[in-house]
Image: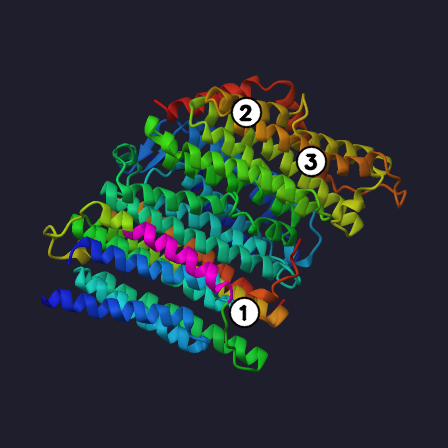
């Protein structure tokens, strides 16, 4: 298998995640799409690292994984807070701010 | 050797100190605000002790003219915002003062790291270090009806754009074979399709961060819901950080190969100017109006960037400083009026000139500067970026910019008309807390000073920009 | 077909299939479980790329951590609202066009010039090399990562805390 196969696999997953981000109504669903996008970035990085024999891409992956997990924790805390205040997780209902 | 890191170390120590003090004290506002303010000012002074041109870790972290310029902008604007936020009355700001100020300091730390990063991993970590506290600060009034919504929208846009940015970074890493930004110019000149793709992703992701068209929709919602002194800072510092990242990635050392991006940036600039200014016209909420006008100003700065010349970048930096003073000042006046009138509508400004002449005059100066009237900072800023664009022969873009500037004057003057021509609904003056007044005064001095005597700022901006093109 | 190719295609089918399920299924809870499968599949891809350490990190932090947090969030919000949360989609055409356009751009850029087919030899103990690199060349971002996680944690606690 060449590098191309891995890059295209990552691109497919990235675009599926992007599709989820654009189409999902539920904010948790949007978050899951973002997770897929970030996940495909890691495939890209590791594949580039392996096929160039350079460890930096793998180090980069360690950083992206840690940052992603932090973001997920913070994002879900905001979702829970919003739920307490407004009783909704649907993006369409978030319309107090308009104009 | 660690002198290069001195401002960052100072900010880190300050963050820890503020957190510790906050955990010791349980009642009242406590000293966190003053400590933060003193720390930010001290760090600002400290940046002048850092020798220019030092670097760490094989050049992945540099303190050059651009990074010091940007770091001072971040620190100065943060100090103004902290000064003004000490007058906020909501209980959360006194009870959770330590958390609030910790988040501000960490965000400034992220910005200053970002400004110095010449390596992708450090750049990404700096970006996230800047952004994550901003989500907290946006939703800080968590019992408010709109703050959590604004925080969530900002968060979703912020993380999605981070994903796009880091996806672009992965391609840049793959093509250049290293995470150092030093490899970008050669790869850009060679023009590998994956490199172009990666840079396009980076441009789109950074477009979200600076709220350029078509990635701008999050800005008005976020600005409207968050506390105004914080928004004053949010509307300038992270944008400046985004521009610094764009300069590091697309401009520094790239030379003629960067010109391939000129049409894309020019289109982005034109669309952003037009959208921001047209959307601002119907706004009845002053914070939303300033948010859309802020989007338009991002467009003007992109004009300077699109010139991709030393003078273009220099004039963009000059514009950033002028915009910082003018925009922060306007938001701080909004804070004073909103706190007294309990309204962010533009009708709250009726007859402000009769009620509080000084406050109205300050607002007028800020609006004129944002509008680009002669003898205040914004005039020179617009003139200079347009001049840089003309030097590159971008007459169409400059013509478009001139037209929308007239449009912008219309809605700025709508606010001015309410202040100076319409009669007040109530006679009593608008109370301005002393600290807020001090912050507004600093912005007035900045705007008028830059307007009457722009030469030193121009010289500084030219010197910073020239190092990027050598 | 070699063993590696077989494993790659197997993982690719799992990964793409579960990713599609994440963005298409109506049941939010199922979506999270599909995400767990996609993240586990990614760990498998890392194994194929000789990155055992990252595969382990992926399973522990990503598949373990994120899925736990999301399930927790769903359970909490469902308890608050007292009903099952389902989710629907909107703007499907726009989403499909944007996603397909970007996919076409990436694929054409990837195919335009031939890329490496062979893997250069790497140090046998990648885990040790990654550790050494993090603590030397990337010690500054590593330290900042600690500050970042502290800030994220504080933000999460601030928002999720029910009192005040």
Q: Identify the residue at image location x=38%, y=53%.
A: C101
Given this view, does label 1 or label 2 mark the residue nearer the observer?
A: 2
How would you classify the magenta stretch by its main secondary structure? helix
The verdict on a common chain for dots 3 and 1 is no
The residue identified by callout 1 is A80
User: How far is mark 1 from mark 2, CA to CA?
Assistant: 47 Å
Q: Secondary structure at mark 2?
A: helix
Q: Is residue B149 left or right of residue B420?
A: left
Q: How is the image coloured?
A: rainbow
Q: Identify the residue at image location x=56%, y=17%.
A: B455
Q: Which quarter of the rendering shows the C terminus of chain B?
A: top left
Q: Which mark is drawn over residue B406?
A: none
Question: Could you tell me if residue A74 is visible in this image?
Answer: no
User: How far is mark 3 from mark 1, CA to CA?
Assistant: 37 Å
| Whether label 3 touches label 1, CB < 8 Å | no
Given this view, does label 3 or label 1 mark the residue nearer the observer?
A: 1
User: How far is mark 3 from mark 2, CA to CA?
Assistant: 28 Å
**Pick the front one: A8 or C51:** A8
The verdict on a common chain for dots 3 and 2 is yes
- Residue B373, x across and y down, in percent: 68, 25
Q: Is residue B438 left or right of residue C112?
A: right
Q: Chain of mark 3?
A: B
**Pick the front one: B183 or A61:** B183
The residue identified by callout 3 is B440
The residue identified by callout 2 is B386
Q: Chain of mark 1?
A: A
- Residue B199, x across and y down, in percent: 35, 42
Q: Identify the residue at image location x=46%, y=62%.
A: C93
Vertical comparison of B18 with B414: above or below: below
Part of the protein shown in magenta: C90-107
Question: Could you tell me if residue B238 is visible in this image?
Answer: yes
Q: Residues within 10 Å of mark 1 (few under 14, many from 20)?
A: many
């Amino acid at each position: 298998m060449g590098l191309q196969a891995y890059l295209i696999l990552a691109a497919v997953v990235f675009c599926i995640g992007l599709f989820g981000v654009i189409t999902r109504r539920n904010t948790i669903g949007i978050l899951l799409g973002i997770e897929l996008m970030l996940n495909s970035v890691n495939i890209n990085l590791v594949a580039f690292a392996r096929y160039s024999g350079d460890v930096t891409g793998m180090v980069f992956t360690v950083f992206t994984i840690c940052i992603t997990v932090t973001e997920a924790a913070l994002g879900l805390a905001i979702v829970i807070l919003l739920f307490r205040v407004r009783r909704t997780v649907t993006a369409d209902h978030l319309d107090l701010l308009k104009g | 050797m660690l002198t290069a890191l001195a401002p960052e170390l100072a900010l880190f120590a300050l963050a820890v100190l503020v957190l510790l003090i906050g955990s010791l004290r349980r009642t009242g506002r406590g000293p966190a605000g003053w400590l933060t303010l003193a720390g930010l000012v001290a760090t600002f002074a400290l940046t002048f002790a850092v020798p220019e041109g030092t670097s760490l870790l094989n050049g992945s972290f540099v303190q050059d003219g651009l990074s010091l310029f940007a770091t001072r902008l971040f620190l100065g604007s943060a100090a103004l915002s902290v000064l003004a936020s000490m007058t906020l009355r909501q209980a959360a700001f006194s009870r959770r003062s330590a958390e609030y100020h910790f988040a501000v300091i960490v965000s400034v730390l992220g910005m200053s790291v970002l400004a110095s990063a010449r390596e992708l991993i450090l750049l990404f970590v700096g970006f996230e270090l800047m952004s994550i506290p901003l989500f907290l600060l946006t939703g800080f009034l968590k019992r408010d009806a709109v703050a959590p919504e604004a925080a969530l929208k900002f968060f979703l846009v912020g993380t999605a754009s981070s994903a796009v940015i880091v996806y672009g970074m992965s391609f840049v890493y793959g093509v250049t074979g290293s995470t150092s930004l030093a490899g970008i110019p050669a790869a850009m000149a060679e023009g590998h399709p994956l490199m172009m793709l990666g840079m396009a992703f980076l441009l789109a992701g950074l477009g979200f961060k600076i709220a350029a068209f078509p990635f701008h929709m999050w800005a008005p919602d976020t600005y409207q819901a968050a506390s105004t002194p914080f928004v004053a800072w949010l509307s300038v510092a992270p944008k400046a950080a985004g521009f610094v990242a764009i300069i590091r990635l697309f401009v520094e050392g790239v030379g003629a190969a960067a010109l391939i991006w000129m049409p894309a940036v020019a289109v982005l600039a034109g669309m952003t100017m037009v959208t921001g200014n047209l959307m601002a016209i119907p706004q009845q909420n002053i914070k939303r109006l300033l948010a859309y006008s802020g989007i338009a100003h991002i467009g003007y700065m992109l004009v300077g960037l699109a010139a991709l010349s030393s003078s273009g970048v220099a004039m963009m930096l000059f514009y950033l400083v002028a915009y910082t003073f003018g925009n922060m000042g306007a938001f701080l006046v909004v804070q004073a009026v909103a706190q007294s009138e309990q309204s962010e509508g533009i009708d709250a400004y009726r007859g402000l000139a009769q009620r509080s002449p000084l406050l109205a005059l300050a607002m007028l100066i800020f609006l004129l500067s944002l509008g680009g009237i002669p003898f205040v900072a914004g005039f020179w800023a617009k003139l200079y970026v347009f001049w840089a664009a003309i030097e590159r022969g971008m007459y169409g873009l400059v013509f478009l910019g001139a037209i929308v500037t007239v449009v912008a004057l219309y809605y700025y003057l709508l606010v001015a008309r309410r202040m100076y021509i319409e009669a007040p609904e109530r006679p009593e003056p608008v109370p301005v807390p002393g600290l807020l007044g001090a912050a507004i005064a600093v912005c007035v001095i900045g705007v008028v000073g830059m307007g009457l005597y722009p030469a030193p700022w121009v010289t500084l901006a030219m010197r910073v920009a020239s190092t990027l093109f050598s | 077909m070699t063993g590696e190719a077989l494993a790659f295609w197997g993982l690719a089918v799992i990964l793409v299939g579960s990713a599609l399920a994440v963005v298409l299924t109506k049941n939010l809870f199922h979506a999270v479980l599909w995400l767990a499968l996609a993240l586990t599949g990614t760990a498998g891809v890392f194994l194929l790329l000789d990155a055992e350490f990252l595969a382990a990190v992926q399973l522990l932090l990503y598949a373990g951590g994120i899925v736990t947090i999301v399930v927790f969030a769903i359970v909490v919000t469902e308890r608050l609202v007292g009903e099952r949360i389902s989710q629907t989609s909107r703007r499907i055409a726009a989403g499909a066009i944007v996603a397909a356009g970007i996919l076409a751009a990436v694929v054409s850029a990837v195919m335009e010039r031939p890329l490496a087919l062979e893997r250069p030899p790497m140090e046998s103990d990648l885990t040790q090399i990654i550790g050494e690199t993090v603590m030397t060349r990337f010690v500054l971002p590593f330290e900042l990562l600690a500050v970042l996680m502290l800030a994220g944690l504080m933000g999460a606690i601030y928002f999720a805390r029910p009192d005040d």
